[in-house]
Image: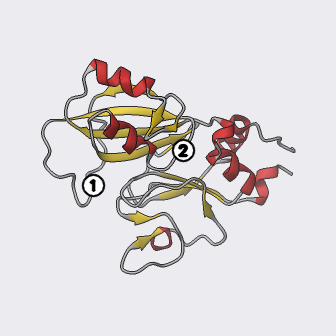
Amino acid sequence: MSRWSNFHYLKFHKPFEVLCQFSPSPPKLTLKNFITVPGIYPAGRLDYRSEGLLLTDDSVAQHRLTSPQYQHPKTYLVQVEGLVSDSALQAIQQMDSISGQPISPVAAEFIPDPGLSHRLPPVRDYHPTCWLRITLHEGKKHQVRRITAAAGYPTLRLVRFSIGSITIEGLEPGQWRNLSTGEVKRLYQELRIPVQE
């Protein structure tokens, strides 16, 4: 029997202004408003104003997904206020600390508008703005927002697009689906978790 047959894995596109928890917190929405599957826990947190999520109830995978020790890549689509210059983009990639706290270097690049679903409520009418793709290998609190702010470009919208090979493609905000056996097996390989067939 495969190790992952004992666990329930799903991916969820967390909407804006949803708390990343299953316990109720009226009047705010939580994951429980969207997902009724029992016994699952978020693998990695997103703040109230961020979007996108992978869920699992496997404590081993959960630890390896969130611990900086395992250097698992997490990619974000980031809309920032202002037009980021080439030199500012380079500074973002070379940033090694925020407020005196060491951070690992990130990968960052310009991207066209990714055509995401409209956010409710929408991003306020800032002009001009641009989009970046930023990949981290650690997950310090508000790291992406703090990096762009330190470079002089406040984050307006933040969407976690992928964790390793698992993405939110095909999911609208508020939607979820079970991961396939192939997706879970690939995730285990990426996390270097032994698999028992």
Residue 55 percent coordinates (x, y): 58, 56
Which quadrant of the structure image shows residue 195? Answer: top right
Residue type of the residue flagged with mark 1: Arg
Q: Which residue is drawn at 57% across and 35% down?
A: 137
- Say few, some or many: other residues with alpha carbon within 10 Å of mark 1 (under 14 / 14 to 19 / 20 or more): few
Residue type of the residue flagged with mark 2: Gly
Left or right, residue 155 beside residue 189: left
Q: Which residue is drawn at 69% across and 45% down?
A: 64
**Residue bearing the label numbered 1:** 119
Q: Can residue 169 be seen in this view?
A: no
**Residue bearing the label numbered 2:** 139
- Say few, some or many: other residues with alpha carbon within 10 Å of mark 2 (under 14 / 14 to 19 / 20 or more): many
Left or right, residue 15 beside residue 115: right
Q: Residue at x 35, y 63 (%)?
A: 17
Quadrant (top left/top right/bottom left/bottom right) for the C terminus:
top right
In this view of the protein, which residue sits in the foreground, 138 or 161? Answer: 138
Residue 46 percent coordinates (x, y): 47, 55
